[in-house]
Image: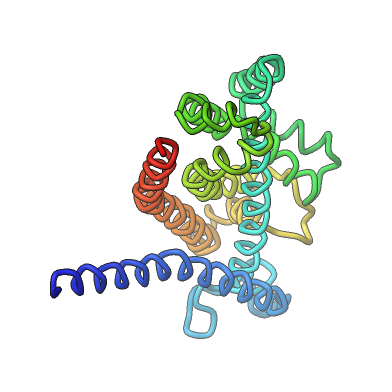
Amino acid sequence: MQAGNETNSQKVKRRRSNRWFFWLPLSMLLALLAFGAFSNGQVVVNLQLRNEPPSLTHIFGTDWLGRDLFFRTMSGLTRSLTIGLFAALFSTLLAVTFGILSWWHIRIDTVIVWVADLLLSLPHLVMLLLLSFAMGGGLKGLIIGLTLTHWPKLYRLLRSEILQINEEPFIHVSKQLGKTKAWIAGNHIVILLLPQIVVGFVLMFPHAILHEAAITFLGFGLPPEQPAIGSILSEAMGFLTAGIWWMAVFPGLILLATVLSVDWYGRLLGEQLKVKGGQHHDRETKSSSF
């Protein structure tokens, strides 16, 4: 009896820890986005405070127009996070959709595999630049360009998983019972792919942020009145030789810490969901035997 109580208490603790594991990072992201929106209103030009070093008043110093670098960095980070978030979300949706379509019909699979291989064989940043310009540039063009260049890797992973799931007994039973492909996809395949989908989205997020930063660093993608981390770093390069190091160091460290934190969380999330996905897969297999 005691052993049973201990087991139940362990399950309760595990559920609580899992809730914190999922909701705490989401809350931090929302808080960061809200603070970034607030910071945007704090970025004010003051030529009397040009190129001030870090101090208690301006912890990151000021830039060449006297703007507080901390608030400007947080505002730029929020814009980069927003772009990366939408790009990762749309890329994940594309990867899932194309994965299901590849399973649906072999001819569709041939076309999508060819397109994915083509995109993976071309220089990534060059394709991103061309697609962003072709889509009109700006925020919309950058998100579309990131979306169209980031789905192939996740698609290939999901496609291989779908091919394995398609050989499972419960899939064959569903087909024999007359279930449609749409029903099988919605009730079996997508559910079993959820761990890979979630982890793929989280791991794609920092990659999208880095590529957005690279494009804006080169001076493409966003107009000057909508600075992101990349454009802030690009501006800072011209002041390094003058000894104004804080304009590059602090935004660079913030970008690095953000990308590494999201990537680290994505890998931990993969370990958490790997167990859950395996347990769900076992339950599906057992249920098909009755």
> Considering depth in this image, is 82 or 56 the residue closer to the camera?
82
Q: Residue at x 53, y 85 (%)?
A: 57
Q: Residue at x 63, y 42 (%)?
A: 186
> Most extreme residue toward the bottom, as rendered?
57
Q: Residue 273 appears at what percent x and percent y?
A: 40, 50
Residue 186 left/right relative to 260: right
How many marks on residues?
A: 0
> Most extreme residue toward the front, as rendered?
290
Image quadrant of residue 95? top right
> Considering depth in this image, is 219 or 211 the residue closer to the camera?
211
Residue 56 left/right relative to 128: left
* In the depicted structure, whether residue 166 falls above or below residue 235: above
* In the depicted structure, whether residue 9 falls above or below residue 83: below
Q: Residue 245 appears at what percent x and percent y?
A: 49, 60
**What is the quadrant of the N terminus in the image?**
bottom left
Q: Residue 31 appears at what percent x and percent y?
A: 57, 74
Q: Residue 232 appears at what percent x and percent y?
A: 63, 57
Q: Residue at x 63, y 64 (%)?
A: 78
Image quadrant of residue 94? top right
> Most extreme residue toward the right, as rendered?
136
Q: Residue at x 53, y 33 (%)?
A: 158
